[in-house]
Image (cartoon, rainbow, N blue to C red):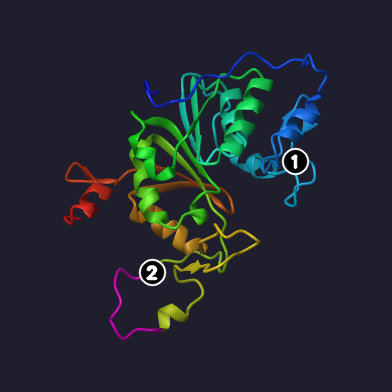
Amino acid sequence: MSSTADPLAGKPALAPIGAESDGRSLAQRIAELGEWFHNLDLHGVHTAPRHFLGDFPNIKWQPIGKAIPQDLTGATVLDIGCNGGFYSIQMKQRGARRVLGIDVDDRYLNQARFAANTLGLDIEFKKCSVYSADEISGQFDYVLLMGVFYHLRYPLFALDKVIKKVAGKLVFQTMIRGSEEARIWEDDYPFWNKEIFRDPDFPAVYFIEKSYSHDYTNWWIPNRAAVEAMLRSSGLEILERPESETWICEPRRSTQRGRYILDLELEGTL
């Protein structure tokens, strides 16, 4: 497993949180941290028991978790867009040596730190954008990009940055809309061929100008073919699709002439 020492990483978790001297209950402390998007089980108290998606993200994790080794002893993990820390916690509970979760939302980071501390888990959390992920030193055995892609105004740019951190596998999850079919397409089409763009299975990404599901950060929502095409375009090989919106990949062609695709593109030599 790869080993990195990251000077940018946050502080490790504290000892497990016990009863507060002021008598506040665990449920009260959870509520004080604001609305939770991750429904975590903290010693029998759930952080988002009335989530509109049900027991989320546990319902998402059940099939995904089967595709990840139960024993991650010695592994390093980067959880990008960690939110309340659910996936970071799952990876740490499987024995990962180091787990670093990053997010740009202070509320989510405070929730994640509280959850990890409550469970007595040594997980690092740091405020950092996906667009700055490539500035974190070293690489990681597992990089998780879960529920982030469609919230990004510049998604492919971010994906090309994230790949720089992947030493082993990328676990990628995104909302998809439109066709869920995947077909083999030609390598090239003539300029006057407009028919392919009328085919619902052709790789396509829907742009949300204002808001979707009351969330103005939902920018780009791809169909399945577009997700897989973008992953391949960034030099990733798709190994597995454990559930309809999740892909497990390895970077097989993310460099050309010894340089990352992103760097070649930015200097105009791709």
Q: Horizontal and vertical percent for residue 46? A: 77, 34
N-terminal-most mark, 1 or 2 = 1
| Quarter of the image where the N terminus is located | top left
Q: Badge 2: how crowded within 10 Å, few (<14), some, or many (20+)? A: few
Relative to 261, is 47 on the left or the right?
right
Residue found 36% across the figure and 53% down from its top: 157
* Residue 230 image position (x, y, % from top left): 40, 57
Residue 222 rendering spot, x and y as whole percentages: 50, 63
Q: What are the residue bounds of the magenta stretch?
A: 185-194
Question: What residue is disc 2 on?
Answer: 185
Residue 162 appears in the picture as rendered: no
Q: Secondary structure at mark 1?
A: loop
Q: With 187 as the anchor, is 200 left or right in this view? A: right
Residues at marks 1 and 2 touching, judged by CB atoms closer than 8 Å: no
Q: At 49% across and 68% down in the image, what residue appears?
A: 207
Asked which quadrant contains residue 66, the reply is top right
| Most common SS among magenta residues | loop
Residue denoted by label 1: 48
Residue 59 on the magenta span: no
Residue 81 drawn above or below residue 180: above
Q: Quadrant of the C terminus?
A: bottom left
